Image: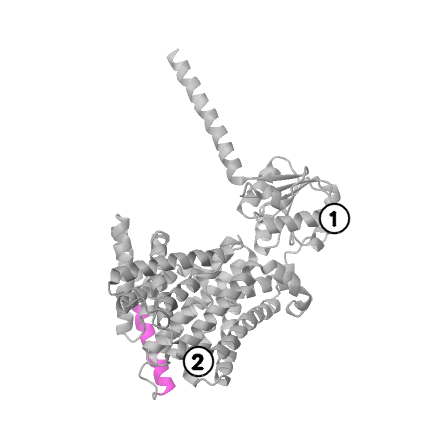
Amino acid sequence: MANPFSEFALILGLSAIAGAVAVRLRQPLLVAYILVGILVGPALFGLVGAHDQIDLLAQVGVTVLLFVVGLKLDLHHVRHIGPVALATGLGQLAFTILFGFILTLVLGKDWLTALYIAVALTFSSTIIIVKLLSDKRELDSLHGRIAVGFLIVQDIAVVVAMMAMSAMRGADDAAVAEVALDLLGRIAGAAALIFVLMRYVLPRVVDTLARSQELLLIFAIAWGTALAALGEHMGFSKEAGAFLAGFSLASTAYREMISARLTSLRDFLLLFFFIDLGAKLDFSTLGGEIVPSIVLALFVLIGNPLIVMAIMGYMGYRKRTGFLAGLTVAQISEFSIIFVAMGISLGHVGMEALGLTTLVGLITITLSTYMILYSQPLYERLVPWLGAFERKRPFRELAVEREKHRHDHADAIVIGLGRYGSRLAHKLTESGIDVLGVDFDPEVVRAMRRHGLTVLYGDGESPDFIDTLPLDQVPWVVSTVPDTQTNRALLDALEQRGYRGQVAVVTHEQGEARALRVGDHVHLLYPYTDAADFAALDLAARIASAELEREKETS
């Protein structure tokens, strides 16, 4: 096929079909895109010859990806990364690099290739993890916030690693001290330039351009690609330059709008990066990488979660919190592949390193996706062996454990104090209802207690915790967690406990009654429908009142 436009049409069509299959299998799209690249590349059917065009789009896609990452990393978030996120992120990085380096050496790789692969094994996919946690509505949970915290630590680390490796370009025989000093000097120069631009130049420029959203978007892309090119010229990498370009705009008032507009463009352009990657895979060298890829994939799937659980257990978190957070690092990311690809462009490693990293990525991303999606059943199966990852007294979570005295009476127990649950609990309290709140996030418990609400710390779907609640005296139990599996577990626990009161369950789906096996004592709450009905009644009353006023004025 000689026509590049026809080749692009073929690529997009195959990507849409493969993507639909991946969504059906609940897999990230990048797995499907790599497979499309293998399919159309010279390794199989050789359907595409427009490699230069695809490579250019792939480079722009990586630039936009790093730009968006930098854009979301404003100084406020950097200052407020919690100690557990920082300790867990750095601890996991150190563990994976050290043991990954040793393991890769044992597998027969040279030291520089082993270093690249070991560093690549440390990075987890922020995009994939945030999407999975968001789909499960766990992004605001305790383990979700901790996971996002140490993913930010990883994002910072990947840029530093790219800068460090790019500083080694042509410096194989130079002293380590010289390379380090050269790197520090260039980082200091880049930091000074970015500071001046952020403080005195970019806010005024962005304010002027923001009068047109289209122009602001064009400026953002131009700024990202310009600093990417400048970063490469200064001896860093395009990726590091693009990250700094995004970071320089992260403190502006328009960061969310720019990020939202760029997200779809990023996803589209990254399609070509993964297709280009799949097309370049050399299957003649991959045959010898199958065993090493399986060994390293098992290391990532098992070793990374274990070190996260060990650190979080030592810091005073329960084994369940550590386990759920640990699953989020059981894969490598698109950054890992980009990092090794950068090593090839610098002449540090060969294509076999990229092939090995890609195989590890395909294995870990595929398996870890299902591990996160089915984290609760997996935890229930493994919990007898997880006791070593919890202190006898998990003080950080026990600090907000329920009070020593039992709450012998309440009119309603509200389980789940997110935005909807906390609002519901406060409104019930204002109406004279004695509410007892339940949540397993210590920060939420503290915040609700500061607002005068009686709150217990605990897991509302745990039968052991349900047994501690004063259910004999409480006529209503309300779950505001919009998750069918969680609510099914709660209803089963209440049934085993012999609870005879009324239960209200929040859901966003009209067909949940059958899945929850709802009986006469279980009531479904539909927040969106109820809000619309209330708003319609309120507006109807206001419109009728206005009509009466007009009739009085005319009569």
For the residues marked 2 and 1, what is the alpha-carbon distance in whole angstroms?
55 Å
In this picture, residue 550 sits left or right of residue 387: left
* Quadrant location of the C terminus in the rendered image: top left
Badge 1 density bin: few <14, some 14–19, many ≥20, Cα 10 Å: some
Q: Which residues are magenta?
A: 175-194
Residue 415 pos. (x, y %): 62, 47
Q: Give yes or no for contact between labels 2 and 1 (Cβ–Cβ under 8 Å).
A: no
190 or 19: nearer the viewer: 19
> Residue 271, located in which quarter of the rendered image?
bottom left
Badge 1 marks a residue whose secondary structure is: helix
Of the pair 448 and 358, the residue shown nearer to us:
358
Q: Residue furthest top?
A: 555
Q: Amino acid at mark 2?
A: Leu
Residue 298: quadrant of the picture: bottom right
Total marks in image:
2
Q: Is residue 101 left or right of residue 501?
A: left
Which residue is pictured at 29% across the width and 58% down the height? 220
Magenta span: chief secondary structure: helix
Q: Earlier in the sequence, mark 2 or mark 1?
A: 2
Residue at 66% x, 56% y: name it.
Answer: 401
The residue under label 1 is which amino acid type? Arg
Choose between 273 and 241: the one closer to the eye: 273
Residue 115 badge? 2
Q: Residue 59 in the image: x percent, y percent?
A: 31, 67
Q: Is residue 123 visible?
A: no
Residue picked out by circle 1: 497
